[in-house]
């Protein structure tokens, strides 16, 4: 026997439709005491956007002749005055037309974010990337093997196989470049954030601690740049045989 349809499913759509698509899905979920993901699932499965578009189309087709006559009276060229509600509905209609449901949900979640809020999120992402890269590149011994590349060739006189062993310290050059670029982007984000945020923004205190960690990482990168670049080692082993050995 099929499971009975959850009545909150239709209720969620009605709430969303009555708000002209303005109400956030997470707020609808809280009102109905269901998970955010469940409301998003209902929206996708029941094609809420298509239903709303269909209602708008039908409403236009069902305009009565009496109303048409009424609209003809008075100023033949009236100036349209959109209310805030209509403007929001039009904006939502454009979103539904050009963006996927997932993109719309992301935009809804971050709708109240200021420019400084968005910059702060980018700062946290960039900071975590810098620290993560530092951990990935940490090795106990400079002679640790990171990768092994091999190649084979066959010629008239026989065949040969070459093995190239890449050591940890050989990866420092690419690591230094990546860290230097990430730090430059981080500094630029911090500069923009400080210019746009208020003086008493508590996040500026957190920036000081983050900057301390960044300075420590930069000092380690500078030390690596000064290390002898001649330590790179490549070991090649050639195993050759010819027809005369048979």
Image (cartoon, rainbow, N blue to C red):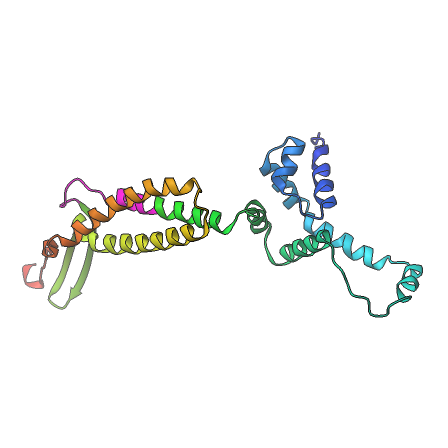
Report the residue that reaches farthest toward the bottom. 76
Residue 236, position in %: x, y?
11, 56
Identify which residue, 196 or 164, lies in the foreground: 196
Identify which residue, 217 or 102, lies in the foreground: 217
Q: Is residue 229 above or below residue 109?
A: below
Residue 47, position in %: x, y?
68, 48
Write the start and end of the magenta stretch as one range: 129-144
Q: Is residue 147 above or below residue 70?
A: above
Horizontal arrangement in the rendering, residue 68 relative to residue 189 (left or right): right
Identify which residue, 52 or 67, lies in the foreground: 67
Which residue is drawn at the image coordinates 48% and 47% (left, top)? 117
Horizontal arrangement in the rendering, residue 35 relative to residue 70 (left or right): left
Horizontal arrangement in the rendering, residue 14 relative to residue 115 (left or right): right
Quarter location, residue 243 = bottom left
Report the residue that reaches farthest toward the front. 199
Tell me if residue 167 can be seen.
Answer: no
Tell me if residue 106 can be seen.
Answer: yes
The verdict on residue 82 being magenta is no
Residue 88, position in %: x, y?
68, 53
């Amino acid at each position: 026997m099929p499971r009975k349809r959850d009545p909150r499913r239709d209720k969620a759509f009605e709430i969303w439709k009555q708000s002209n698509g303005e109400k956030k899905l997470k707020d609808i979920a809280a009102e109905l005491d269901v998970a955010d993901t469940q409301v998003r699932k209902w929206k996708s499965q029941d094609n809420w956007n298509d239903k709303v578009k269909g209602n708008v189309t039908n409403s236009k087709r069902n305009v009565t002749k009496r109303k048409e006559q009424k609209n003809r009276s008075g100023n033949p060229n009236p100036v349209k005055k959109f209310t805030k509600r209509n403007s929001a509905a039009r904006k939502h209609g454009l979103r539904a037309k050009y963006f996927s449901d997932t993109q719309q949900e992301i935009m809804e979640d971050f709708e109240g974010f200021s420019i400084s809020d968005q910059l702060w999120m980018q700062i946290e992402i960039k900071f975590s990337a810098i620290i993560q890269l530092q951990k990935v590149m940490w090795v106990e011994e400079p002679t640790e093997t990171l990768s092994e590349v091999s190649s084979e060739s066959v010629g008239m006189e026989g065949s040969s196989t070459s093995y190239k062993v890449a050591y940890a310290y050989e990866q420092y050059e690419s690591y230094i470049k990546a860290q230097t670029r990430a730090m430059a982007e981080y500094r630029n984000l911090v500069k923009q954030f400080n210019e746009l945020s208020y003086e008493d923004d508590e996040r500026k205190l957190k920036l000081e601690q983050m900057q301390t960690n960044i300075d420590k990482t930069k000092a380690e990168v500078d030390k690596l740049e000064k290390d002898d670049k001649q330590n790179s080692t490549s070991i090649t082993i050639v195993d050759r045989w010819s027809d005369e050995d048979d």
